[in-house]
Image (spheres, coloured by chain):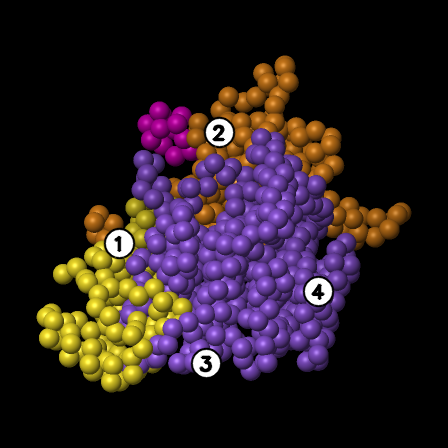
Amino acid sequence: MSPVPIEGVEEVLGKKFSVIKRFTFVGAVCGGMLGFALAAGTAVLYLHPTGGRPIITIPPFLIIAYELTILFGILATVLGFFLSARLPMIKERVYVPATAVDKFAVTVACDSQPHFQQAAKILSTAGAGEVSQLEEEA
Amino acid sequence: MDFFERIRDGWDKHRKPAHEDDFDYAWTMAIDLDICTGCGACVTACQAENNLPIVGEEEFARGREIKWIRIERYWEGEFPDAKLSFIPMMCQHCDAAPCETVCPVSATYHNQDGLNTQIYNRCIGTRACAVYCPYEVRYFNYTSHHWEEPLDQQLNPDVTVREKGVMEKCTFCIQRIRQAKDRAKDDGRRRIRDGEVQPACVQSCPAQAMTFGDRKDTQSRVAKMINNPRAYRVLDELNTSPSVIYLKKVDADAP
Amino acid sequence: MPPEEQSLVYADVNRDVVRSLLVTGPRYYVALYTALGVTVLCFFFPWFYQLFYGIGAAGMNHPNVWGTYLSSFIFWIGLSHSGTLLSCVLHLTNSPWRKAMYRSAEAMTLFSLMVAGVMVFVHVGRPWFLHWALPYPNQMEMWPNFRSPLLFDVMAIATYLTGSIMFIYMGSIPDFAAVRDRTTGWRRHFYVLMSMGWRGTDREWHRLGLAYTFLAVLIIPLAVSVHSIVSWDFAMSIVPALHQTIFAPYFVVGAIYSGTAGIVTVMFLLRKYMDFGQYITTVHFDNLGKLLLALSLMWTYINLIEIFTAWYSGSSAELEALTYKLFGYYGALYWEMILFCALAPLLLISTRFRTSFVPMLILSIAINIGMYTERFLIVATSLSRQYLPDAWGFYVPSAVEVSILLGSLAMFTTLFLLFVKLIPSISIYEVKETLATPSNKTGSDAWQPSH
């Protein structure tokens, strides 16, 4: 945990992949199709000729499709972020409030006391300021 | 998903620009400027027929008159050689109307008779159609109007009274066209005969300078007037395809 | 780094921002209540009068059917462009000077969009039916007319508003978390809700960075398209002064220009009244000044092109509209606009001007006055001189319109004043990124950063 984003942590920990870009892409494509379908579909549902133009006019409907592409892309990205960052936090998780100010923390998940002693020794030799044990819901 | 099927079936039909081949009638008005004297009887008749409000002297001075047909006057030269030309200007019912495209709630559209119609109930008063109209024939109700007794007895029951906040314009007296169509239907589905329906302005012109009819009927008087060598359309270069033909005034002094 | 920043540490940032949120003096309340009072008096009362009387309460007539309501609408949409757009562009170019100011700039965007939305209600003749412009299934089986540029406008502004809200919210989540730990009572509940349980783990930071970049990439073309679409409300007509292809770039450049001037004003006020002197420095004003200069030159160029094209076309209607704009009834306003927006910003060439605070404030206000004049002139002069000379007219705004314009400014101020006390107006974590990482010697406990 840290007060600022740190470059390179994800690579070290080995998890770089994120589903967010898939969300964005799918959302944007859906938005585009939905936009054109909305404009063209409602135009043929109630035939309403205006301005000597055809019922399904391409340039204006492309603009509607473009706007909805971006709208759904944005909404899908936000949804993807919340899902992949696992927010909002439903279960109680460990949190050190000082990390929001100027401290950096490393959490290690241990399932038994000997593991905890081992992890504490590794962290102390690496130069940790303080090592403590925190409980977390399973 | 009914509209997907509708889109697929009607793709070619829906991609074709609206054209007068599809219209039932194509109402056209022809005005002979050589005969027109600029008397303004058409303006008065329109006001009486269509329940146009009298906005009052103060509002008129602020430029908020509502005249569905107006006589435009242009002066050339200086006294005593000044020349006056005038032209009655009403909604041209353009086939490629710029005002129809811009209404966000589809309160104006081109109906099957080739008329540019205004749906007062749907209008939310954006006023974009008035900006887009190059002829500036659209008028907005800036305030509510009321007719004092006994002027309210003069109102035409066939035409609505518009509330504040809606646009209105010349409709080619669509209530009269509708009545003529009903009469034709009662008579056994015949078409409206030439000269059977006349808007208020055409009916009231003392010099009979205005002619109204269906240009799809090749025998009608207006259809013949379209081919007159003096015939022209106002602001034709904008490609709005107006349905009002003007016959140019014969000017003995002009080169 | 300017000398005043070298002494800043992470803890100072938290402390200053939390102080800006919690500590309120009487000056703040005076400002807030004044702004609220002016809003109610000058915006809502005249508007309710207009709802009962009709649009006739404004000065519009035939042919000037559009007036200051629409030019105010476009002005507020324009002002909204700079915040989010600039923030996104500078994020993608990794500019360091963006860090302290982008939160307030984005807030400015959000509130201008809201004020612009309210101006639409004031502008239309029957606002109680304005919901018909939205696509929703109804018993009339009527849908809005998607071919209309006004409908593109509805879609675009709705998208931009949603995008701005999402963008500012996502960027603020870590800051809400930082502030939540230091507050109590209703504030704490609010921040707990808004921060969604953010802990600052690497996974969260990484995802946030990705999502934020994607949003920035999406919002840039959106912002360009929004004001182009607003310009097409005008440009898709066929009347002389409005039917020009230059309108889309003209409006976009004008929007970013007036928005950046708005950012300068807001930055000055924040710096002065919220004690953010260490965060908003001459570096920011210098860079904003350079941006303003570039935009001013582009804006001047586009205006010259517009004049040239109108003259070169030879069309008598265009020439008449142009002559009327430059020398007609509103001619004085045109030259005032040129003075404030094309000539005065040339002062920005000097670095000494750019780094002095009060002159920049005065210039930014002058630029916005000039840009409002520009929008007003587009609306008023083009409608006064169209093709048919019999239908020419002129337009004078009425007292109701001027009052509503002032009221919209007060509304924006009220919203912004509420913002500075509820949401951290400087981005805590981004500012920390520009500072030195705390080591063993600084900070309250003897902790050390580790991977």
Whether residue B206 is situated above or below residue A38 in the rendered picture: above
Q: CA–CA distance between discs 4 and 2?
A: 63 Å
Mark closer to the chain start, 1 or 2: 1
Say which of marks 3 and 4 sits in front. Answer: 3
* Few, some or many residues within 10 Å of mark 3 (<14, 14–19, 20+): few
**What residue does disc 1 label?**
B7
Residue under the point 33% across and 27% down: B188
Please identify, in this view, whether the residue under mark 2 or under mark 3 is nearer the observer. Answer: 3
Viewer-nearest of discs 3 and 1: 3
Left or right of residue A65: residue B58: right
The yellow one among the chains is: A
User: Is residue C295 shown above or below B139?
Assistant: below
Label 1, label 2: how far apart the Cα atoms are: 36 Å
Secondary structure category for the residue under label 1? helix
C292 or B247: which is nearer to us? Answer: C292
Residue drawn where x is 32% and y is 49% of the image? A42
Tell me which amino acid carries mark 1.
Ile
Q: Nearer the viewer, residue A43 or C182?
A: C182
State whether residue C87 appears in this view.
Answer: no
Question: Going by the picture, which residue comes out furthest to the top?
Answer: B150
Residue A61 versus residue B178: which sits nearer the camera?
A61
**Residue assigned mark 3:** C436
Please name the predominant secondary structure of the magenta segment in the image.
loop
* On-image quarter of the C terminus of chain B: bottom right
The crowding category of the residue bearing disc 1, from other C-alpha atoms within 10 Å (few below 14, some 14 to 19, many at least 20), is many
Q: Chain of mark 3?
A: C
Q: Amino acid at mark 3?
A: Ala
Which image quadrant is residue C183 in? bottom left
Residue numbers of the magenta segment:
B181-196
Residue at 51% across, 75% down: C8
Dot 4 alpha-carbon crowd within 10 angstroms: few under 14, some 14 to 19, many 20 or more: few
